[in-house]
Amino acid sequence: MSDDEPTIFERIVDGDLPGHVIYEDETTAAFLDANPIRRGHTLVVPKEPHQRLRETPQGLVQDVFGTVRTVAPWIEEAVGADGLNIGVNDGPAAGQEVHHLHVHIVPRHEGDGGGPTIGGPRERHSDEEFAETAADIRAAGDGD
Ligand code: DGP
């Protein structure tokens, strides 16, 4: 990226901004979305910032989707979801607001009325609710 300012997501990964991190490895991290579509809405990011999927090295994209594969079942189990929307808003024209590649994982329940895309109304959660959700997800992953 040409911009030297760290992105919001780099600052969360670096611990400079608060975030409810549910998973971290050498190259990727997963934390709760601050404006969740549903409880458990999680973002998976590469630690190294790249805006677009096409700008991100192949190996790093594989790492990111490997992390999606790791945490998706934890999230589903933690919130008792029936399924997940998993997607990327790739570029501003596609609704990308934070210019650091991120994969949304949005829990879905049968008949919850949501659409098939990553967008729509957001819920408001207290910090305690976020902390509880993150703990539930981490606990769901404990056996892995
Ligand atoms: P997108 O439109 O795909 O760029 O989605 C960006 C998401 O990032 C959006 O769902 C809200 C979330 N978000 C924005 N700022 C913050 C933040 O400071 N912390 C966290 N955890 N999530 C954020």
Image (tube, rainbow, N blue to C red):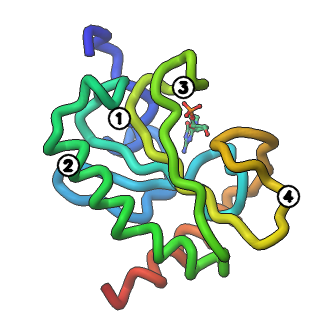
Closer to the eye: label 4 or 1: 4
Marks 4,1: beta carbons within 8 A: no
**How far apart in space, not on screen, are marks 4 and 1 (Cα)?**
33 Å
Q: Element at badge 4?
A: loop
Q: Amino acid at mark 3?
A: Gln
Instruction: Name the residue tied to disc 4.
Output: 113
Q: Nearer the viewer, mark 3 or mark 2?
A: 3
Where residue 79 sits, quadrant-wise, is: bottom right
Q: Earlier in the sequence, mark 1 or mark 2?
A: 1
* Residue beneath disc 2: 27
Residue bearing the label numbered 3 = 96
Mark nearest the camera among 4 and 3 is 4
User: Which residue is drawn at the image coordinates 46% and 28% (left, top)?
Assistant: 90
**Mark closer to the chain start, 4 or 3:** 3
Quadrant housing residue 69? bottom left
Residue closer to the observer: 116 or 9: 116
Q: Amino acid at mark 1?
A: Glu
Q: Nearer the viewer, mark 1 or mark 2?
A: 2
Q: CA distance from mark 1 to mark 2?
A: 12 Å
Please tell me the numbered disc located at residue 10. Answer: 1
Q: Estimate the x, y position of residue 7 in percent, counting from the top left.
A: 40, 26
- Asked which secondary structure carries label 1, the reply is helix
